[in-house]
Image: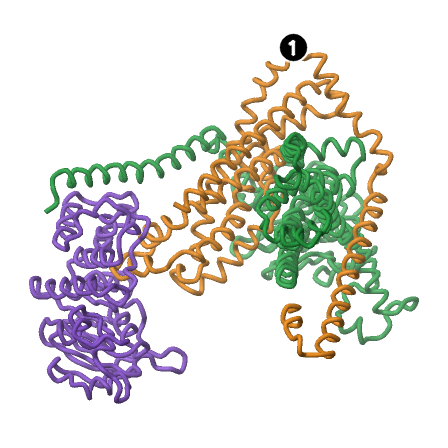
Amino acid sequence: MTDAVMQSEIHVLFRRKRIMALALPFMVLAYLAYVVWTFDVVGLMQRAEPGRAQTLLADSYSYKTHITRSNRTGDWDAAIEGERKGKYDEGVFPAWAVLNDTGMTIALNHGHEVTVSPEGEMRYDVPGFGLITALPTRRGIETNLTPETAPDWVNMSNTRLSITTRGGRVNVTKSKTEVFRYFTGWELFFFTLDSPYHGHSVTEILFGDQIDPTRGNVAGALHDFWMNPMWHHHQVAWAMFETILMAFLGTMGAGLIALPLAFFAARGFNPLRSTRFALRRVFDFLRGVDGLIWTILLSRAFGPGPLTGSLAIMLTDTGTFGKLFSEALENTDKKQIEGIQSTGANRLQRYRFGVLPQLMPVLLSQILYYLESNTRSATIIGAITGGGIGLLLTQAMITHKDWEEVTYYIILVVLMVMMMDWLSGWLRRKLIKGG
Amino acid sequence: MLNVRHVTRLFGQKAAVDNVSFDVDRSMMIGIIGRSGAGKSTFLRMLNRLTDATSGEILFEGRDVLSLRGKDKRAWQSDCAMVFQQFNLVPRMDVVSNVLHGTLNRHSALRTALNLFPRDDIERAMDILDRLGVGEQAPKRAEALSGGQQQRVAIARALMQDPRVILADEPIASLDPMNAQIVMDTLRRIHDEDGRMVIANLHTLDTARRYCDRVIGMRDGRIVFDGTPEQLTTGVARDIYGADEGFSEAATSTAIDTISDAPIPA
Amino acid sequence: MSDTALGHHTGGGTTRDAYFEMVRRKRLYGGLTILVFVVLLVSGFVLADGRNAGGFWNGLSQLGDFPATVVAEAWESRADMPAHLVTYFPALIDTINIAAASTLIGVLIGGLLSMLSTRGLAPVPWLIPICRRIMDIMRALPEIVLALAFIFILGGGPVPAMIAIAFHTCGALGKLFSEVNENADLKPVEGLASVGASWPQRMWLAVVPQVAPNYLSYALLRFEINIRASAILGFVGAGGIGYELKNTISWGQGKFDEAAAIFILLFLAIVIVDNLSDLARNRLTHGGKK
C-alpha cells in the first residue's frame, strides 16, 4: 500500500502541474491580449480600408481597358489601363468596341452592352434592372435615374454618374464618358501595342511569316519583350541580379574576412587573452549595430546602390561569422591537430591540414545558409538604400497603382528566394559530402 | 465474443497477415506464437486499429472493429488496451501521468491539455500502480524506471482504460527473465481476477504453454496451429518456427526455471 | 576514398597511377573552383561599384563624416541625452513587442504546421506535401512585401509589421520544427494512439514534451532575428523605433542628437537580447542532456 505521505505528495505534484498547465496558456493569451490592446488592433480594424484590399487583389490579376469619349470634341480613344503607353492608335479600337455612324457600341463582360450615340447619349440596358440613359450637357448629366431610384451600385450627382456592374464600369461626366471593361491577366506583359508583335501567337512568331520587315521574328520579338516599356523586363532582371549580387558579395566577403579573424578570437589559437576579448567585442559590435544602421551609415558615404547593400550585409555578417567560426574553432578536435604537429608541421600547415578540414563543413553550411537568408535581407536593404528588386518593389507599392507589377515582383522574389534556398541546399549536400 | 474472419494485410505485394480466421467464445488468455516476421505484431496492431487491415472482418460482441472510424475507432481503442514491447510510455512525464493517459479517450483534448484529470482518476491510477507493485515509483519520471517497472506502468495504463481486452505485443521481449516472469504473472492475474481477455504475442514456447489457455501459432502470416497448450508438441512447434531437428524448447526460453533446468551451453 | 587506394600496397603501378590521377584531378577541380570564385567576387565588386551612386574609394574617405556629425551634435546637446532615451524608450518597447508577438504567433502556427507536415505525426498523409509547400512560400516571402501591402490596407503602425514578420516566422520556424519532429521518438505517440487518444492529445502529451526544449531554443534565436526585422520594417513606415529613426535621421532636421539616442537604444536592446537568449539557449541544450 502507498502510504499517506505518498498520496499527498502525488496530489501536490498534480496541483503544481495543473497550475503550470493553466499558467502557460494563460500567460500566452494575456500577452497577446496586451499586444492587441497596446497596438490598438480594434481601432485599426475600424480604420482599415477593406476597399483597398479589394483593389489590390483585383488589380493583381486583372486589368481594364478604357474606351473614352471626349464630350467636348466628340472624339473617341482607347487605352489599356488608361495609360499613355497602352494607348491604341488613333481610330483603332479593340474588337469589342465598334464605332460607326450610329455611334459607339461596346460589349462588356457577361453579355452587357453599352451604346453611345453620336450626340453623346449613353444607353446601358443593365440585365435584371433596366435601361439607364445619360446625356452630358453643359448644365450637367441628364439621366432617367433619380437619386431615389438609383440602386447602390450607381453613384450619382448633378455632374457625375458612375455605374459599376459585373460587366464593367461606366463613368459619365460633363467632360468625358468612360467605359471600362475588365480582363483577367496582366496586360501587355509580352508586347506593348506599339510593338508589331502584339497580338501574335508564339507559333506565328517562331514559324510564321516575317512580321517586321526590318528584323527577324525571334530577335525582334525578344528585343521588344526585353525592352517592354510597361513592364521593363530588362530592368527587373537587372534588379534581381543586383539583389543576388548584394547577397553573394556580402556573404562571401564576410566569410573571407571573418575566417582569419576567427582564429585570433578563438581560445587555443590565440594565447593573448586581451586580443581575443577585444575581437569578440568587435564581432558583438558589428552584429549589434545591425544591418539597418550599417545601411544608413554606409549610404551616406557611398550613396545608394548595390555596393552599399553589399557592404552593409558584409559588416553585419562579419560579426556573425566571426562569432560562429571562432566557436567552431574552439570545438575542433585537438587530437587531429596534434597529429599534424607531431610531423613537425609549422603553424600555418597545422591550420591548413589539422583545422580547416574540420572547420570546412561548419563554415560552408553556415555561409550557404546565410547566402539564402541574405537574399531576403538584400531585398529589404535594397528598399532602404535604393538598389535591386527591393527598390522596384517599394516604388511600385508606394504609387498605390500598379498592383499587377507588385504581384509580378513578389512572385519573382519568392521564386528567387526559393531558388537560392534550393541552390544553397544542393551545394551544401554536394560540398559537405564531397569534402 | 471475438470473431476474426479472413483478415489480410498486404505490405506492397507481400502479405504480412494472410487470411487469418478464428473465433473466441469466452474470455480467456490467448498466446500467439511464431518467429519474428510471422505477422503476430501486425495482427495485434490491426486488432487495436493502429494498422489498417487490407481486407477481412473482426467482430467483437457484434461490433465491427475494422470498419470503425474517428470517434468510434478511438472508443474501441479505449476498450482494447495495448501493451508494447518497448513500453511506449512518454519518457519525460511522471509515472502517474503516464497511467492517466489511459483515460484520454474519456476526456476532451482541452481538459487533458490543461492537466485537469479528476482527483478520483489520480487515486485510481495510484491504486493500480500499488496493485502492480510499482506504487513507490509514482512521482518519478517514466524514463528513470527499469524496463520491468516501465512495462508494469504500461500495464497500469492499460488497466486504467478499464478495457475488455488487453493486447500485449511481445511484452517481455525486452526484459530480463526475472522481470519477464513478473510481467507475465501480472497479465495472468489480471485475466484471472478481472476476467479481461488477454491476447499476447510471445516469441517463446514455454511462456505460452505456462500462461495461456489457448495457443495460436503463426507462420508467414498464416495460422498453422490453434489449440490448447497440451496439444503443442515439439513437432508442432518445429512446424511453427520452421526449425529443424536441432530445435529445442529451451533455446527459445526466457523463464528462469526453464533456464536453470536446461543444460548450460559451454 | 584515398585511404582505400593507399591500402593496396601490393597493387603496384596501376593503383598508384590511379591515385596520382585522382590527386591531379582533385587539384585541378579545386583550383578551378577557387579561380571561378575569385573572378566572380572581384568582378561582382567592380560591377556593384560601377552601379553604385558613389564610388568605393571616394566613399571610403567620407565614411567617417556622417558618424562624426552625429556624434558631434549629440555631444553638443549631451545634457538632453537622458531625456531622449526616455522619450524613445516606448518606441523600443513597441519594436520588442512586434518581435515577441510575431515570434509567439510563429511558434504556435509554425508548430502546428510542422506537426501536420512530419511523417508519422500528420493526421492525414496527403496534408504533408501541401503544408510543406505552404511553409516554403511563407518562408520565401520577405517581410517587407507583406508589411508594405498591409501598410497600404491598414495604414502605418506596428500591426502591419507584426503580421508580416509573423507570416515569415511561421514558415521559418515550421521548417526548423519539422526537423526537430523528425527526430522525436514515435513510440509514445503510438502508445497514446493505442489508448484511443485523439490527435491533439497525442501531439500535446507525447510529442510536445519531447520537442519543447528544441522548439524554445529555435524560438529564442528567431526572437533575436525578429527584433532586427521589426526595427528595419519600422524604417519603411511600420512603427516602432525604426520609424523614429527614419524621422530623426533625415538631413537638415537638426535631430541627430535624438538619432544618436535611438542608435544607442537599438544597439543596447539587440546586444542584451542576444546575450540573454544565448544564455538561455545554452542552458536549454545542457539541460536536455540531463
Between C9 and C225, the one nearer to me in the picture? C9
Report whether A196 appears left or right of B251.
right
* SS state under label 1: helix
Q: Colour of chain A?
A: green
How crowded is the residue under tag 1: few (<14 C-alpha within 10 Å), some, or many (20+)? few
- Residue B74: image x %, image y %? 25, 61
Q: Residue furthest left?
A: B193
Quadrant where the C terminus of chain A sits is bottom right
**Would you identify the image quadrant in which residue A313 lies?**
top right
**Compared to C22, does B133 lie above or below?**
above
The residue located at (12%, 85%) in the rendering is: B231
- Residue A11: image x %, image y %? 19, 39
Q: Which chain is rendered orange in the image? A: C
Q: Is residue A114 visible?
A: no
The amino acid beneath tag 1 is: Ala
Q: Colour of chain B?
A: purple
According to the image, label 1 marks what residue? Answer: C79
Q: Residue furthest top?
A: C79
